[in-house]
Image: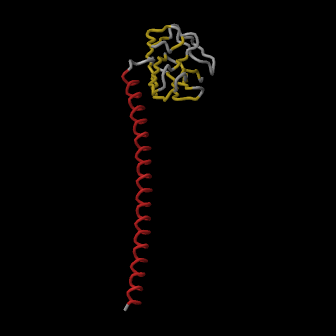
Amino acid sequence: MQVENVKLNNAMHALEVKKQDLNDKVDGFIDAGIRNLTGNVAEMTAIMHSLVAQTMMELDILKEPVLGVFGVDLKNAPTMWVVLVDVVFKTVLVNEGGGYDSNTGRFTASVAGVYMFTVQYTLFTNKWAFFELVHEGRPLQRSSHLEKDTAVSVSMQVFAKVSKGGKVWVRVMH
């Protein structure tokens, strides 16, 4: 009986050791999980703060007055145009923000954003026109018209994402 008692005590001691080992492993897994979770929460908090700050900056930009409104007129336009030449509007009616340069005919964006550009021209009897709106050398919108019978007005309109310092202008194509 004493031998059986010793065996039973040894078995109980071995079970206690295994129990402690399992408890240590579970505690280690829980600690590692908490550390990972804490790190993930901290990272997500930092990302959230960054996104909130970026959104606040973008909202502040949207609250600012519009920069880049301009209206121009081409008085006494030539009857013949040179192909692939920029159209320079010398008569500046409005130039809010100073983005339009009446020496080059180019608009330069003072802030990055989506801009709307509209061009309207009038053709008289028996006249042909082919113009395009250009952004950094790439055509955004083209318009061509041949009028045989009466004077007619032609319009182009385009939205363009323009970076700060980006340029947009009108060019003669034909």
Residue depicted at 41% across the width and 31% down the height:
53
Q: Nearer the viewer, residue 108 or 31?
A: 31
Q: Nearer the viewer, residue 6 or 169?
A: 6
Task: Say how the picture is coloured.
Answer: secondary structure
Image quarter of residue 8: bottom left
Quadrant of the drawing holding the N terminus? bottom left
Q: How many numbered markers are drawn?
A: 0
Left-right relation of 82 to 63 = right
64 is higher (above) or lower (below) than 31: above
Q: Nearer the viewer, residue 104 or 2?
A: 2
Q: Nearer the viewer, residue 123 or 110?
A: 110
Left-right relation of 160 to 5 = right
* Rendered location of residue 47, percent (x, y): 43, 40
Does residue 129 appear anywhere in the picture?
Answer: no
Quadrant of the drawing holding the C terminus? top right
Image quarter of residue 94: top left
Residue that sits furthest to the bottom in the current view: 1
Residue that sits furthest to the front in the current view: 2
Residue depicted at 46% across the width and 19% down the height:
120
* Rendered location of residue 96, percent (x, y): 44, 12
Residue depicted at 40% across the width and 53% down the height:
34
Residue depicted at 53% across the width and 19% down the height:
108
Left-right relation of 31 to 135 = left
Does residue 40 appear anywhere in the picture?
Answer: yes
* Rendered location of residue 121, percent (x, y): 47, 18
Image quarter of residue 115: top left
* Rendered location of residue 24, percent (x, y): 43, 64
